[in-house]
Amino acid sequence: MRRRIIAGNWKMHNNLSESQNLVTKLVNELNNQNINREVIICPPFTSLTEVSNLLDGTKIELGAQNMHFEDKGAFTGEISADMLKSVGCKYVILGHSERRTIFGESDEIINKKIKQALNAGLIPIFCMGETLEQREDGITNDVINNQVSEGIKELSEEDVNKIIIAYEPIWAIGTGKTATPEQAQEVHKFIRSLLRENFSENTSQNIPILYGGSVKPNNAEDILAKEDIDGALVGGACLDTDSFVSIIKA
Ligand code: PGA
């Protein structure tokens, strides 16, 4: 059976004390509960060390929201994979649409980052998704096909099997508009077919594919019930512990 995962992307929210409060609440809420999903949270860089300490001894795992593709060097303002590992990160979100659109990250850069993360022993949460215009033009599958093939270019099948994929239609991120469960399922199934074509049936069945884009307590259950949807990457709703916990339990 595939892994079931709920990941929270805090984005640029929460200073140190706010992070401490949010994590403490989450740990208390999930403590002693029988949760059958893996839970990952991705705070901003400045909170990673503290959140890592607070998560010690819990089942919640830590991820970062970005990293640079070089080992080290004169890259002012950047953070390396090794730095993330050294503060307890196991995961890193790569290729998020906000990185692609606001910060101009290309498929090539994302591919380099994915390779670097894997080399360092971090698990990429590799994001992809189409714009509203692309969906309306009927080219969603072409866009996804391109993002998948460019993103995992030159990776071995073994490495590809370590990755988590997140399908996040850009028009659904932070907008309150969600893809219908059927729309999401269709793309997830398509991503699996690409993995089958490029690698094997085993790989296509093994890789967890999360849905992201305005996942809330009131829509999580229907989305997560779909066959090829193995979890969610949650933005806005993960900043509220009650909402996040109810998605985790959905
Ligand atoms: P959202 O963000 O849940 O606020 O739409 C999801 C994401 O960007 O990962």
Image (tube, rainbow, N blue to C red):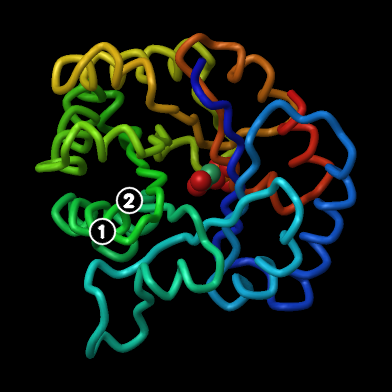
**Ligand 1 positioned in quadrant:** top right
At numbered mark 1, what does the secondary structure look like: helix, strand or loop?
helix
Q: Is residue 13 above or below residue 36?
A: below
Q: Position of residue 62 (x, y in %)?
A: 59, 56
Can residue 213 be seen in this snapshot? yes
Residue 70, image quadrant: bottom left
Q: Are marks 1 and 2 in contact (CB under 8 Å)?
A: yes
Local crowd at mark 1 within 10 Å, few (<14), some, or many (≥20)? many
Front of the two marks 1 and 2: 1
Q: Is residue 218 above or below residue 23?
A: above
Q: CA distance from mark 1 to mark 2?
A: 9 Å
Q: Which residue is mark 1?
A: 113
Q: At label 2, which amino acid type do we have?
A: Gly
- Toward the viewer: 87 or 148? 87
At numbered mark 2, what does the secondary structure look like: helix, strand or loop?
loop
Disc 1 within 8 angstroms of ligand 1 (CB): no
Residue 226, disc: none
Q: Which residue is mark 2?
A: 95
Can residue 174 be seen in this snapshot? no
Q: Please tell me which residue is depicted at 87% across the width and 34% down the height of the picture.
A: 33
Q: At label 1, which amino acid type do we have?
A: Lys
Q: Quadrant of the C terminus?
A: top right
Q: Please tell me which residue is depicted at 15% across the width and 34% down the height of the picture.
A: 149
Residue 15, image quadrant: bottom right
Q: Position of residue 136 (x, y in %)?
A: 29, 24
Position of 178 with respect to 132 (left or right) is right
Q: Position of residue 65 (x, y in %)?
A: 47, 60
